[in-house]
Amino acid sequence: MINDLELKNYPFGGDYSPEQWPEELQEKDIRLMQELGVNTVTINVHSWIFDEPAEDAYDFSWLDRVMSRLKKADISVIMATGTTATPAWLYQKDHGILKTDIKGRALKHGVRERFCPTSPTYIAAIEKLVTALASHYQDEKSILLWHLNNELSGFCYCEHCEKEFRIWLERKYGTITALNDAWCTAMWGRYYTSFDDIMAPTELNELYVNVNKEGFDLDSLPTEAIEYARFMSEKHAELFALESECIKKYVPDAVCTNNFQFRDRFNYHEIAKTLDVIALDIYPNRGESSYEASFNLDAARNFITEDKPFLIMEMSPNHASWAKCCSSKRPGEIGKIAMDNIAHGANSALYFQIRRTPAGFEKFHGAMISHAGHLDTRIAQELKALGADIAKLPLDLQTEGLGAQVAVIHDWDEKLGVEIPCTVQKMIDYSAEVKHYYRYFHDHNINVDVISLDQEFARYRLIVAPMVCMVREEYAQRLENFVEDGGTLVLTYYSGYTNECDYMYLGGQPGPFRKIAGLWVEEIDGARPEDDNSMVFPDGFTCGAGWMCDVIRTEGANILARYGGGYYKDTPCLTENTYGKGTCIYIGTKPDQAGTDRILDMAVGKVGVNPVLSTPGLVRATRRGAYLFLINHGETEETVDLHGELSNVLTGKMERHCVLAANAYAVYRG
């Protein structure tokens, strides 16, 4: 069970778009699906125009025929609502259904995911469409779950959104004086006398574009931009809630999801609260380190309820059409990616797409069935083998989490506070900063959760919280309580600077963390690439450091390392402070990978968290409940000592050693 979703198998299949092909091809497609082992397909994702070819003229007959054929083949359906691809007739009725971009340009009808989230016309239309769809299929038992809209993409800055933003702000702050005080609008004379004075933050009024021709933009009033991002997330969440409500009116036990793909500045953690189950689209780039994808998986597992399984809604069986270079999946890579997802908590392996589209933007995107129209292909045979292996996975695995004792904080609201304001280093990629520390746990086979600041801390021994710059006082207090109660907390540079309105904490940084860190940051130096520095440990170990460098005065903290250069040479850059029953480790500059490993080795040793298994090369080990997953992300064969005899789930053999070819995987019980 995933929250309220009971699964009789592991969904294997993907997006199917029969509307792109002659109807007589469906019977052949379904036969090929059965040969591949497909048991689940997603339909109707971009089919609004076929469901409603004219206003209020609903026609689900084409969908009925698809459903009938799939049901006959015992293939389950994920029913999409189709609301991402607005039909031309709706645009002709009201151009305001589409977004206005940050340049102030009203977009025209064309591509998907361009709807305005506050458009009354759009909202009314999707309410009617989803209600009609749910009513029509309310008794259809082959529908496994409902797929709301599609991947979120981009904010809208139209006049209607602007008006709704003012209402949203007035509801939040109450008075314009309270807003002015919270935002410090006296800076540059931006003081407002009425909520009607406030405009959506765009290039026309607020954003400095390509500053100094160095390729970065700056928000002149960052708090307004931060609040607008929060507003946009809330409005998109309301659309999901509306669609879910329309469905559950007719299908009370319906399970609703959306396929998250972490782009733009949406608060996915908050939006997730409108869903019944989390689903991800996973498209690792060829050559990308495996921790990049694992990071998203370890986050998805903790969105709605801590350490709960989720679904993979999309992967590519081969090319990704939007990539700069459409590299083919190498032998074994399809299975490696899918099984790694399952190792980290996924309960499905679904692809975009079943049959390769014949034209348009995605004609070179991978598919289970190629343009050749048969399965005599390398990709199809690998998919067939993968489907057979997934079918061997025991059903009790579906309820298992990873039971991590370590957490890394990646907070979606914090992302706004780090990336939007003007700071000592421009173009900060908050997620990349967090991954710099997350990578250690992935590479050392230590199960780890990726969580937000409002989630439960008590079950962890160690929390790593990089760049907690914009922090609410109550969250800072919760981290303080975690340390006081015996936990170990790792904080980094650029932490404890502002509250949730980007208003500086006065009295010295790291603000609300000053007491638990046992130090005061007198200055923060934005180090240029040529400003090489280092961290020097008492035993002589030295590593590279820089990018941000705190000039630290200790207030009770022990010094673990000092700077090797700069005007602050020999001053502290790594400290440890005992607070209550616990410890706070403070990293005052960005260490290189060797330095990060040294610091986190120390933290892990302090709390007594052990790796799942020691593995050679690029083999990674993950434990999910009673099951051990081994994935070889390398290009050479590796042999893993299992330290005892374990049962191979996929072969039925008892083994003491596991021999893994490049891109191979194995699953053991015990």
Image (cartoon, rainbow, N blue to C red):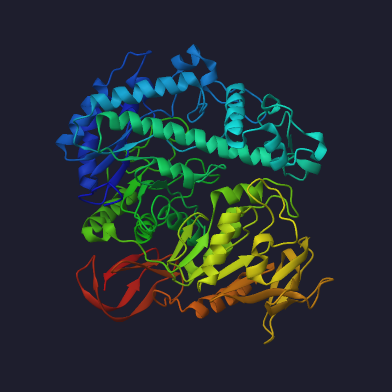
Q: Is residue 41 left or right of residue 538?
A: left
Q: Is residue 495 visible?
A: no
Q: Is residue 306 left or right of residue 571?
A: left
Q: Is residue 216 visible?
A: yes
Q: Quadrant of the C terminus?
A: bottom left
Residue 381 placement (x, y as % from top left): 28, 52
| Residue 105: quarter of image | top right
Q: Residue furthest bottom?
A: 539
Relative to 322, say whether 126 is above or below: above
| Residue 403: quarter of image | bottom left
Q: Nearer the viewer, residue 240 or 32?
A: 240
Number of labels in the image equals: 0
Q: Nearer the viewer, residue 69 or 227?
A: 227
Q: Is residue 600 left or right of residue 520?
A: left
Relative to 227, say whether 613 is above or below: below
Q: Is residue 543 left or right of residue 120?
A: right
Residue 23 placement (x, y as % from top left): 25, 25
Residue 472 placement (x, y as % from top left): 60, 52
Relative to 477, say whether 115 is above or below: above
Q: Image point 48% across, 59% down: which residue?
A: 450
Q: Residue furthest right?
A: 567
Q: Image point 60% across, 72% down: which residue?
A: 584
Q: Image point 27% across, 46% down: which residue?
A: 5
Residue 37 placement (x, y as % from top left): 22, 48
Relative to 288, say whether 266 is above or below: above
Q: Image point 28% across, 58% down: which residue?
A: 399
